[in-house]
Image (spheres, rainbow, N blue to C red):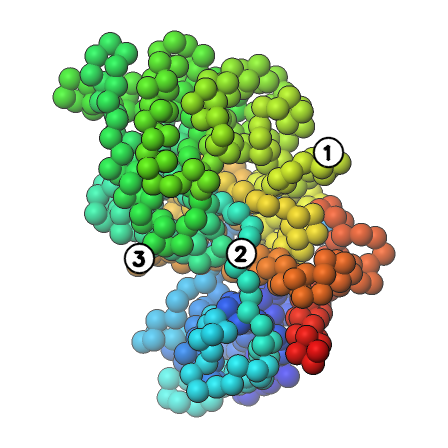
Amino acid sequence: MSQQTQSFETRCLSSLSKVFPQAELHDTPFQTGTALWNEVYSFQVAYRSDRLIKGITVELESELAPYATIRAVGLSPAEMPAYAETDSNYITTEPGLFPDVLYPVIESEGVRALPNSWRAVWVTVKLPTMEAGLAGKSKTASAYPIKLTFKEPAGEVLGQEEFRLDIVPAELPEQKLIHTEWFHSDCIASRYGVDIFSEAHWALLEQYVRNAADHGVNLLLTPLFTPPLDTAIGGERPTVQLVGVEKTGDGEYRFSFEKLDRWIGMCRSAGIRYFEMSHLFTQWGAKHAPKIVATVNGSEQRIFGWETDAAGEEYAGFLNQFLPQLVTFIKDRGLQDAVYFHVSDEPHIDHLEQYKRASELLRRHLDGFKFIDALSDYSFYEHGLVEIPVPSNDHIDPFLEGNTNPLWTYYCCGQFREVSNRFFSMPSARNRVLGLQLYKFDVEGFLHWGYNFWYSQYSTRVIDPFCVTDAVCAFPSGDAFVVYPGDDGPIDSLRWEVFREAQQDQRALELLESLAGRDKALELIEQGLTEPLHFKRYPSDMAWLLGVRERINAAIAEALTASASQ
C-alpha cells in the first residue's frame, strides 16, 4: 500500500506505468507478480516529497537481491512526441519531459527527490535458469518478498514498499522469434569519438552487441559495406565497412574478410545467432550502389555510391566477383542457414522493375540464401521477388490473408495509428502487447530500424540522444533508438525493457502451448474480449495485459501439476 512519512510518498507500480513528474499518479498500487525461471522481471517504486532531498539511498532486501538491480527512471525531452494525426491511445501529444532513460544509481550519490515531483526507481530481477536455481533454495514454486527502503543520508527512513514475486517452477524456453534492431556501428564511433574499427571501437561494439542480445536481438545487421540507410541522397555516412577491397586493375578486385571474421566471432560469443548482411542497393528504390571504399594505387577512395547506376555494368562486375567469395567465406564457417540478405529497404510499387533487376543480379550468386526486405506492398511478394517479406504491422492484412510463410513484421515512425509501437508518448502496454500478437499470428521475425540511431534524419549530423530524441524533429521521440550512450557503455530505456517483456510473453505462451496445446494458449489471450485480438484491435489498458500474463503463468503451473500427478 502507499505510505506517507513526513510528506514522503511511495507507491509500488508495474513496469507498464509511466511516472511523469508533475502529473497526478492515478495508477493503482501493484505489489505482486509471477515469473518463470530464466526470465527478467521488472517493477517500479514511485516516490514524491514536498522538499528537495539529495543523496537518498534505496536499500533492497530480499533473497533475490543477488539477482536484482535498481535504476533511476530519468526524464528525456521530447520536442516532437507525436505526429499531428494520432489515435486515442496516447498518453499525451504535448512536448515535454518523458520517463524513459534508466540511469544506473551511483552509490555515492543515491537518488534525489525534487519538490512535489513524482519520480521512480526501476527494479529488475534477472532470474537464473531453473537448473541453477537460487543458492540453497528449493526449485519448487516459491514467494519471494522484495523490500525497498528509502533513507535520507543521515539514515532516517523516508518510506518503504514491499513487492512479492512468485516463481513458477518452469523455465522460460529459448527464444524462437528472429529479432533484429538495426545496429548502427557508425553512430557508436561518432558518439564516443573513436576511430572506426579501432580497438576502442571494437570494445564498445561488443558492449552494445551484448546489450542487444540480452534484450532478445539474435539477428544483427552486419555492415559488409556502409549500410545505405537513412542517408541523404548524394550524402554519405561514416565508412563502416567490414570487407576489405583492393582495386587491382580495370574492373578487377581483391577482397579480404579479416574484419568480417572478427565481427562474426564477436557476435557469436555475445549470443547472436543470425547475421543480416547489409543492403547491397540503396534505400527507397534500389537505384544506386551503397558506399564502397577500396584501396586504389595505394590510397583509399570511394569507388561506388550515389553516382553508381545499380543496373550498370561496373557494379554488376564488382558483385560478380565479390559475391562468390563471400559465399565461400559463409560456407567455410558453416553460416549458410544463419545468414539473411537484403536487396533494398522499403521499395514502392513504382520501383518494381528496378527492384526485380537488382534482385536477379544478387540471386545469380546467392540462390538458396534467405532474403528479407521491409516492404508494405503485397505485389513484391506476389511476383516472387522477396522470399521473406517484412510488412509493417499496419499493412500486414494482405500477407495474413495470403498465408505468407514465414511471416515477419516491423514497425517504425509510420505506424502511429491503431497498432503497437513504442514512442515516448504511447503507454507501455501498447509496446508490450506486440508479444501476444506475434504469438497469435505465428510471426517468425520482427524488424526495427532503430537500436541506436544517434544522427539527425538522413544522417547529416551527430546528435546528443540525451537532449535530442526525435532525430531533430523528424520522427516521434522513441522511434530512432532504444539505448542511450553512457560513459561506460549502453544505458537502457524503459521502452527497451518493456519490449523484452513482450518477447518473454511470447515465449511463455510457447511454453504453455507445449504443455496444454495452442487452443488453450489462444483461449487465455482472448478470454473476455468482445472481438478477437488483432494487430489493430486490442485492449489498451495495462491491467488487462498484466492479467493475461498472470493467467498464462497460472495455466503453466496448473499443467505442470496435472502432469506430475499422472
Query: For the view shown, which residue lies furthest in the right direction?
Result: 530
In this rendering, the answer to whether 369 lies above or below 466 is above
Q: Residue at x 51, y 34 (%)?
A: 370
Asked if the residue at tag 3 contacts the one at tag 1, i.e. Cβ–Cβ closer than 8 Å, the answer is: no
Task: Provide residue 352's location: percent of width, then percent of height.
Answer: 59, 18
For marks 3 and 2 on the same chain, the one whose residue lies earlier in the sequence: 2
Q: Is residue 121 left or right of residue 193?
A: right
Query: For the view shown, which residue lies furthest in the left direction?
Result: 298
For marks 2 and 1 on the same chain, the one whose residue lies earlier in the sequence: 2
What residue is disc 2 on? 175
Q: Residue at x 73, y 33 (%)?
A: 402
Residue type at mark 1 is: Gly
What residue is disc 1 on? 402
Residue type at mark 3 is: Asp
What residue is disc 3 on? 487
Identify the element where label 1 is drawn.
loop
In this rendering, the answer to whether 520 lies above or below 406 is below
Identify the element where label 3 is drawn.
loop
Camera-side mark, 1 or 3: 1
Between marks 2 and 1, how big is the CA–CA gap?
26 Å
Task: Provide residue 389's location: percent of width, then percent of height.
Answer: 60, 33
Residue type at mark 2 is: Gln
Q: Is residue 397 left or right of residue 272?
A: right
